Image (cartoon, helix red, strand yellow):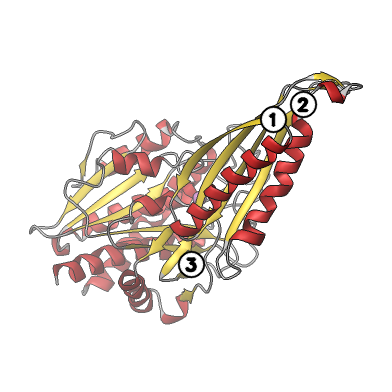
Amino acid sequence: MDTRQRLAAAISGILPRVTALRHDIHAHPEMALEERRTSALVRELLSETAADVLPPFLETDVVALLSGPNSGPCVTLRADMDALPLCEATGLPYASETPGTMHACGHDGHTAVLAGTALVLNELKDVLPGTVRFVFQPGEEVVAAGRDLVEAGALKNPPQGAAFALHAWPGNPVGTIASRPGALMAAAGFFTIRIEGKGGHGSRPEAAVDPVLAGARVVEALQTVVARRVSALDAAVVSVCRFTGGTNGNIIPDSVELEGTIRYLTQEVGQTITTEIERLVHGTCKAMGANATIEYTPAYLPTVNDETMVELAQVVVTEHLGPDQWIDVDVPCMGGEDFAYYIDDTPGAMVWLGMGEDCAPIHNPHFNFRDEAIENGIRFMSAIAIEALQKLTG
Ligand code: NI
C-alpha cells in the first residue's frame, strides 16, 4: 500500500470514534480558557499514541509531539477548542447540555478532526519524515490565547518549519478545502473610549459638560476614518458596538463609555486607523470641553498565508481529496483569527473546510459542524503534515 492508501484505510478505521468524540465535545461546550473537560478528553486519546504529550504551557492547552524514525523538520497542526456564549437552537440529540454555552464556531469539529489526525499519523509514524506538533489551543474567541501560547514557547522546541490549521466554513460545499495566498483573515483590534464631561440637571445643560453629546459626535466622527483616511483600495472597518452612560431622564451623566472593533488587512492601514481614532476622539472631545481616554486591545494580527504553502495545500487536496475539492478564495474575510500568531514568522496556511451551502452561519444558534466533513478534514491535515515535512526535508 502507498501512503495515500494507508491514510485512507487508517481514516476509515477511526471515523466512527472521531464522530462520537465531536458529539461528546459538542454536548459539553466550554468557554475560552475553561476547556478542562475537553482538554482531558484530548489528553486521554493522545495517551494511546506514541506522541509525547507535554505539560500545559498555559492551563487548558494540549501540545503533543509525534516523531518518525529519523530526525527531521517539524510541522505544527493546530485546532481551537473553545465555545461561545450562545443558547443552542439546533434541537440536536447531542445539543449543548450547558445552558448559554454552545459550539457555534465549529471548534468541536476542529478538535475532533485534529484528534483523529493524531490517531491516523500515529499509525503512519514509520513514514513520517520528521516531527508533527499537535496544538489543541484554548481561548481562540476574543482572548486570542494563541498569542499567549506562542509567547509561552509552545512552538519553540523543536522550532517549526511550517504550520497549518483549518476552520469550518458555511456556504462552501461540504468537505471542500478553500484558501488563498496572502491575507485570508483580517487583523482585529478592540477599543474602549471613556469620555469625561461634567454631570448636572437635564434642565440646565449650560451648567454641565454633556458627555452624551460628545459621545454621539465621536461615534459619527469615527465613521470618517475609513471613508476619508483609508484608500478605497484597502479594506478596513471601524465599528462602535456599545455606547453606555447615564441613569435617568433628567440627569446629564459625568461620563459615557464607547466600545468597538477595528479590522484591517495590513499593519500600515492598522496604524493609520489608530492614529486617526486618537486625533478624532481627542479633537472632538476637546471642542466640546470634555476629556477622553482610549484603551486598545490588539487582539489579532492579520492571518497571512504563505504562497508556497497554499500551493502545497492545493496539491495535497488534488491528490488526496480530488481536484474538485479545492476552492480558490477571491477575497479575504474581515473576521479575525489568532492562528495568525503561529504563522507570523514561519510559513504556513489556514484553510476553510466547507460545511455546505445550506449551513447556518458561524456564531449563529443554529450552526452545527457537519459530520460529513470530518473525513476530508482528517485527510487534509494528515496529508499536509506528511507532504510539508517532505518538502521541508528538501
Ligand atoms: Ni472560530
Side of 266 where 203 appears, left or right: right
Sooner in the amino-acid sequence: mark 2 or mark 3: 3
The quadrant of the rendering that contains the C terminus is bottom left
Mark 3–mark 1 distance (CA, rounded to whole Å): 54 Å
* Dot 1 beta carbon under 8 Å from ligand 1: no
Pick the residue in front: 114 or 301. 301
Q: Position of residue 125 (x, y in %)?
A: 17, 58
Q: Position of residue 54 (x, y in %)?
A: 22, 38
SS for dot 2: loop
Q: Are marks 2 and 1 in contact (CB under 8 Å)?
A: yes
Q: Position of residue 221 (x, y in %)?
A: 70, 48
Q: Residue at x 52, y 43 (%)?
A: 26
Q: Residue at x 69, y 53 (%)?
A: 223
Mark 2–mark 3 distance (CA, rounded to whole Å): 58 Å
Name the residue that disc number 2 marks.
Answer: 209
Side of 43 where 27 appears, left or right: right
Name the residue that disc number 1 marks.
Answer: 290
Side of 116 where 326 appears, left or right: right
The label shown at residue 175 is 3
Q: Residue at x 46, y 75 (%)?
A: 325
For label 1, count other residues whose C-alpha is less than 10 Å away and answer few (under 14), some (14-19) or many (20+): many
Residue placed farthest to the bottom in the image?
Answer: 323
Mark 2–mark 1 distance (CA, rounded to whole Å): 7 Å
Pick the residue in front: 271 or 389. 271
SS for dot 1: loop
Residue placed farthest to the right in the image?
Answer: 203
- Type of amino acid at the residue the image marks with label 1: Ala
Sooner in the amino-acid sequence: mark 2 or mark 1: 2
